[in-house]
Amino acid sequence: MFTWLKNILGMGEASGVRARNAKGRFVADDPNTPDVNEAYVDGKKPKRKRKPAAKKAPAKRGRPRKNRK
């Protein structure tokens, strides 16, 4: 489906823009309304982005360390 059509129908992805009150402070989510998230402007919490797996460091070259006991 087209992204512009999803946005019109309200099926699009969350924008991630936090809602603010008149003083400019962040608004908290009301736990009494489970279907709407008041903390975000569009009412949807954005999905969490996963970080890519860290690459393994290459093996070190050079003289090996002495075994200390």
Image: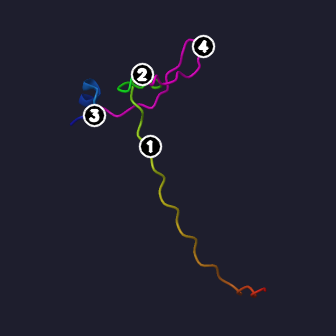
Q: Earlier in the sequence, mark 2 or mark 4?
A: 4
Question: Regarding mark 2 in the picture, which secondary structure is present there?
Answer: loop
Q: Is residue 19 magenta?
A: yes
Secondary structure type for disc 3: helix
Mark 3 vs 1, N-terminal side: 3
- Inter-mark Cα distance, 3 to 1: 20 Å
Tell me if residue 33 comes above or below residue 52 in the rendering.
above
Task: Point out the tag, 3 or 2, that comes first from the N-terminus.
Answer: 3
Comparing 55 with 47, the one in front is: 47
Judge depth for marks 3 and 1 and give the one in front: 1
Q: Which mark is residue 23?
A: 4
Of 24 and 60, the residue lying toward us: 24
Amino acid residing under circle 3: Thr
Tag 3 and tag 2, C-beta contact below 8 Å? no
Range of the magenta residues? 12-31
For the residues labelled 4 and 1, the Cα–Cα distance comes to 28 Å
Which quadrant of the figure has residue 63?
bottom right
Q: Residue at x 47, y 56 (%)?
A: 52
By what rule are the colours in the image chosen? rainbow
Q: Amino acid at mark 2?
A: Asn
Instruction: List x then y, in percent, for residue 68.
Output: 78, 85
- Displayed quadrant of residue 32: top left
Where does label 3 land, which residue? 3
Q: Which residue has dot 1 on it?
A: 48
Q: Which mark is residue 32?
A: 2
Label 2 packing within 10 angstroms: few (<14), some (14-19), many (20+):
few
Magenta stretch: helix, strand or loop mostly: loop
Indicate the position of residue 62 as horizontal and vertical percent values: 69, 85
Mark 4: amino acid: Lys
Bin the neighbour count of mark 4 within 10 Å (Cα to Cα): few under 14, some 14-19, many 20 and up.
few
